[in-house]
Amino acid sequence: MKITTNGRGRSVSASHAKKKKTDGWWPLLFIGPLMLGVVVFYHYPIVKNFYISFTQSGAFGNNIEWVGLQNFKNLFANSDFSSALVNNLVYVAAILLGIPLALVVSALLATPGLKGARIYRGMFFLPYIAMPVAVALVWKLLLNGDFGLVNQALSKFGVENPPYWLTTPGFALAAVCLFGVWASIGFNVIILSAGISGIPHELYEAASLDGAGKRQQFFSITVPLLAPSIFLLTVVQTISGFQLFDALFALMGTNNPALPHTKSLVYLFYSEAFTNNDKGMGAAVAVIILLIIGGVTAIQFHIRKKWIDQ
C-alpha cells in the first residue's frame, strides 16, 4: 500500500486520501433535492419575474412584447404606487414600535415569583399561531361601525357618533396598524422572553447591591443584552410588514372607500397583476418590493455592525 504524507508531515494511506477526495459528493447527494426545489420554486420565479417586468402581454400571457423600463416609468408616475408605499412605511413603523411594547411585556413576565407566567406567554402567543385571515375577520366584526363591540364600548363611555373604523380614511390605516401590532406582539414576546431567560440572574443581583433600581437594571442590563434578539425582530418584522396582504384583504375587501388609504405594495401587486391583468406592471411592483426589502435589510445589517458587533 502506497504511503503519502500530508502537509504536516504525517503519513496518510493512498486509499484514505482517495476516500477523502470522494467524501465531498455525499453532502451534495443529500442536499441536492432540497437545493433543486429551492432553485425551481424560489430562484427561477425571481428571475422570471424580473424578465416579465420588462415586458407587456395580453390578459392570458400571450402577445409578449419587450418594453424595457416602461413598466417602471408608468409605475412611478402612478399615484397609487406612492400612496401604497407611504401606507406600507407607516404600517412597518407601527409594527416596529410594537417591539418596545413587547420588550416591556417580556420583562414583566420575567418578574421573579410571578404566578401563571407560562399561561400569560401562551395567551400572548395565540394571535401569532392563528390564521391571519380568520383573525382579521374577527377584528372586522369588532370594528364594525354599526354593531361592533368597540363602538358599543365607546358609546357606553359617552362617545357620541363613534367612527366607522374600517371605512373612514382617517381611521382605517390606524385600525390596520393596530391589528398589525396586536398580531405581531406574540412572536416578539416569545423571542424576547427566551433572550431574557438567558441573562444570568447574578447580573441583576450585583446591580441591586450597587443600588440600581428596577428601571436602571432594565435599561442597563436587559436592553443591552437583548440587542441581538431586538435586531432579529426588527429584520423579521420589517420583512413581514412589507409583505402585508392577506389580513389587509380580509379587513378591507375590494370595494372599501378607504382602500386607497390603506393599500399596501403587495395589495397593489395583486390589483395590477390579477385584477387589471397587467402582468408586466404587477411584476414591476414585485421587483420594487424585492429591492426595498433587500435594501432595508442591508441597511439594518450595516447598522448591526455598529450597534451589536462593536
Image (cartoon, rainbow, N blue to C red):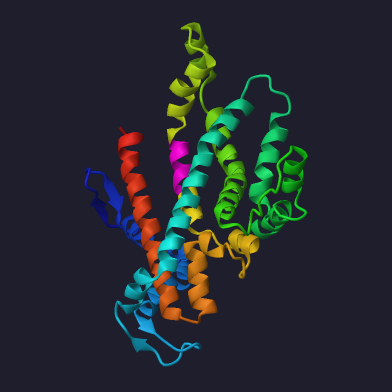
Does residue 133 lie above or below 158 as drawn?
below
Q: Nearer the viewer, residue 8 or 54?
A: 54
Determine whether 82 is above or below 58 in the image: above
Q: Residue at x 56, y 49 (%)?
A: 174
Q: Is 271 contained in the magenta span?
A: no
Q: Where residue 47 sits in the image (x, y, percent)?
A: 38, 73
Question: Where, by quadrant of the figure, is residue 17 drawn?
Answer: bottom left
Instruction: State the image coordinates of residue 296 (x, y, percent, origin top left).
Output: 37, 52
Let me know if residue 132 appears in the view. yes
Q: Nearer the viewer, residue 15 or 193?
A: 193
| Residue 115 picture location, percent across and down | 73, 24
Closer-to-camera residue (217/70): 70
- Residue plotted at (75% across, 56% down): 146
**Residue drawn 54% across the image and 29% down it:** 196
Residue nearest the observer in this picture, 194 or 144: 144
The residue at 22%/43% (across/down) is 8
Counting labels gives: 0
Would you say 41 lies left or right of 5 here?
A: right
Query: Which image quadrant: the N terminus?
Result: bottom left
The picture places residue 229, in percent across and down from the top left corner, at 47, 37
In the rendered structure, does residue 230 fall within the stretch colored magenta?
yes
Furthest residue toward front? 160
Q: Is residue 20 above or below residue 206?
A: below
> What is the magenta range?
228-236
What's the magenta bit mostly, secondary-structure-wise? helix
Q: Which quarter of the figure is the C terminus placed in?
A: top left
